[in-house]
Amino acid sequence: MDKKEISRRTFITTSGKNAIAAIVVGPILVSQCLAKNTSGQMTPVSIDLSDPGNLSLTTIGGSMKIINPLDKKRPIIITRVSETACTALSSRCTHLGCELSLPENSIITCKCHKSQFDLTGKVLHKPAKKNLKSFSATLDGSILTITDLPA
Ligand code: FES
């Protein structure tokens, strides 16, 4: 028998295993899709700026990343822009999706193809053409609350 040929028994056994895997995995994939479709906006995230772990946000120009509940691969970049305000932007570059670094001198630069964005997410330098997704960032005392903006 040629090495590339498979026996009828091997074919039936392998096909059976794949069919069982499809039956088991199929409903899991569907439930994950439904969870994303039905979740709508993200649950608000609160950050206590008096926590030593969030010290970078107590200084104007300071920034940090937090997990994005809607996109676990691309965190949210939070930047303190004034005494009373912060911005919150997706770190997913709108060109081809690379993760953006924290801002330097109030500019967010993509390492992949050098697109640049300001602290409101506006494109300053192509190749990106779309602004970054932004989130609502509300500062109340030392508590910063990040919420999804209405579509
Ligand atoms: S992915 Fe960011 S500039 Fe291309």
Image (tube, rainbow, N blue to C red):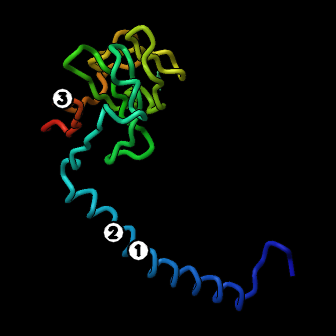
Query: From mark 3 to mark 2, how far is it between C-alphas?
Result: 42 Å
Q: CA distance from mark 3 to mark 1?
A: 47 Å
| Distance (Cα) linking label 2 and label 1 | 6 Å
Residue at the spot of label 1: 26
Residue where numbered disc 3 is placed: 141
Q: Residues within 10 Å of mark 3 (few under 14, many from 20)?
A: few
Q: Amino acid at mark 2?
A: Val
Tell me what residue is drawn at x 19 percent, y 19 percent. 84
Task: Say if mark 2 contacts mark 1, CB within 8 Å.
Answer: yes
Residue 71 horizontal/vertical position (percent): 37, 45
Extreme residue toward the left, this view: 150
Q: Residue at x 87, y 82 (%)?
A: 1
Element assignment for label 3: loop
> Where is residue 55 drawn, in percent x and y?
40, 27
- Residue 38 image offset from top left, x and y in percent: 20, 59
Q: Which residue is mark 2?
A: 30
Q: Residue at x 36, y 75 (%)?
A: 27
Amino acid type, label 1: Gly
Question: In this orientation, which residue lies closer to the viewer: 80 or 109?
Answer: 80
* Above or below 20: residue 144: above
Closer to the eye: label 3 or 2: 3
From what the image shows, is residue 37 above or below residue 87?
below
* 137 left or right of 60 in image: left
Determine whether label 3 and label 1 are within 8 Å by CB.
no
Q: Is residue 138 left or right of residue 94?
A: left
Left or right: where does residue 100 sit relative to residue 132?
right
- Amino acid type, callout 3: Gly
Which callout, 3 or 1, points to the residue nearer the camera?
Answer: 3
